[in-house]
Image: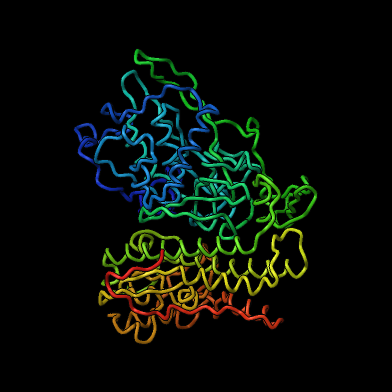
Amino acid sequence: MKLLTVFCAGLVLMLAGAAVARAESMAPVGTALDGPDYAAGRAPVDAQAPRDFQWRITKTAWTESDERAFAAFVTAIGESGCRTFDECLKGPWNIYRASDPKGLFFYADCADLPYMLRGYFAWKNGLPFSYANGVAAVGRSRDLRYSRHGNYVYSRRDFVSSVSGNYPNGYQAMREMANTISTAMYRFEPGIARGQPFDFYPVKISRSSIRPGTVIYDPNGHVAVVYKVTPDGRIRFIDSHPDNSLTRGSYGQRFVRASPGMGAGFKNFRPLTLVGASPDENGSLVGGHIVPASNATLKDWSDEQFYGNADRRNRNWHAARFLFKGQAMGYYDYVRQAVAAHNVVYDPIRETRLMMREVCDDLHYRVQAVDTALRAGIQERAQPSHLPNNIYGTSGDWETYSTPSRDARLKSSFVELKQQVARFLKMAEEGSAKLDYAGGNLAIDLAALYGSEAQLCRIVYVASDQSRRGLSFEDVRKRLFRLSFDPYHCVERRWGARGAELDSCRDGGTKQAWYRAEQRLRNQTERSYETQMGFTLAELRRAVPGSGVDAPPDTDVLSMLRIAAGKTDAPVVDVVSGGDVPIRSGATLPE
């Protein structure tokens, strides 16, 4: 087996017949896990585990009660506000934390997160667990994370007790999964018959099927876990990152639709049954093997999200049409309406406020990500001679400390915000019954709201000279496409500084040249994982194919609102920029 380091979207290029695996280790194993069996090279999951680590299977299958308890477990973590996966499992919101031995460290990137949550819950509740540990491409693919026609499973791993008293080590089982799982395990066509069952299955778009614990897969290489579905149809999710940070958001256009082979969308874990096992003297089930449920037995299995629900004969995903109570609507509107507890009517003021606050959360998450790179000192290292083969999906320091994927999602959120505000203006002009607004001029009211929320949202970064720099929401938007994703750049460039703000940056001429040459890559919001991007500085300067776009999209909501409001004589509330004003150490800002 050939092991290479990969993280969130990360996966090794597998050799034929070899299991997918990952060599990037988690934090050092605690002394309780070190011992002669582990040191001698015996498989730690199958070796006799210390009592507090034992995974004793006491149930042959997951019941509806187990599924409800798992959903409650995920919801509690989602609503807790925990900021790392390790913190999430060690906080009071995890009702099983007291059973964990001291000194453990829990790690999960985005691909690991669903498995870590599900596996941990199964461990603590005596439930059977199995997962796909080997996948291969349908057709040819240079990278199984982005195979054009998806993947199939050729091997699975069961966590079962082979003999009485020899119980799997739950913590080592989680480590094993973390070193194996990648986003390739989510990339499969809904009706694939080749190979063994995947761990997930596509679900019907409904409130009963999309629930806490449901997985959302973005074929651009990201995975999230639903933790809440609000009555008005907002699907809230948690996602994890290579630096072990955990973030939150709402489902929307950042999760793209794609061809069925890429497997985008909502998935639930496939039910598992332990067969052929016998109880031992301790009441634990020993022996047997785990059987995943077939598609035919799954009541909510559906390929609706790929082909629509208007014509069941349709097998062209581009032609998919979505109907709700006979009314045609776009995919994202359909998802929200289908999972809502009642008919969705849009309050444009509330909707815009929530969108802006979620974007503000993303800005704060980016602060954490950049700070992680700075603490590692990546900005002090020499600039490499070329970019990774693909800046969005790679391994090592670039995967851990760069932010091209995170920045692309952030840019998409700003673009989506402007699109949604434009949509509300159009709905108001048309007198749409789907709009809940009783004011006199929506453009003016939205401009006032935007100004208020933009001022409330403030971030701070610590410059190279240790001064604290404050930026408002609108400050960041104006410099959005100047934010450097390159971890080798100074913090000022990571935050798009210009003029006097840039004076404290210590980047030399080479890094300055790279920053200028990467502008076309910063201009794009779409991520391409098939493009070979190991560009040199000279190639970026020549604007070779695949090196970005010449101009960024427009994200200026206020200008659009001013134009719309200009049709009347009513005053428009202006928004005052934060002015990139340095903030003295110890100053406080609104959260």
Residue at x 48% of width, y 55% of height: 143
**As drawn, which residue projects farthest toward the right?**
326
Residue at x 27% of width, y 64% of height: 375
Q: Nearer the viewer, residue 17 or 528?
A: 528
Apparent side of residue 132 relative to residue 396 in the rendered image (left or right): right
Residue 122 pos. (x, y %): 43, 32
Give the answer, above or below, for where 252 lies relative to 461: above
> Is residue 571 among the parts visible in the rendering?
yes
Give the answer, above or below, for where 81 lies relative to 584: above
Residue 457 pos. (x, y %): 45, 68
Give the answer, above or below, for where 308 lies relative to 73: below
**As drawn, which residue projects farthest toward the bottom?**
499
Q: Nearer the viewer, residue 227 or 303?
A: 227
Apparent side of residue 209 relative to residue 142 in the rendered image (left or right): right
Task: Name the image quarter holding the C terminus.
Answer: bottom left
> Is residue 522 among the parts visible in the rendering?
no
Task: Name the image quarter holding the N terminus.
Answer: top left
Give the answer, above or below, for where 199 lies relative to 536: above
Apparent side of residue 283 relative to residue 565 in the rendered image (left or right): left
Q: Nearer the viewer, residue 267 or 454?
A: 454
Query: Where, by quadrant of the figure, is residue 258 drawn?
Result: bottom right
Total numbered badges shown on the rendered structure: 0
Residue 161 pos. (x, y %): 37, 24
Residue at x 25% of width, y 77% of height: 465
Colour scheme employed for the rendering of this structure: rainbow
Residue 415 pos. (x, y %): 58, 69
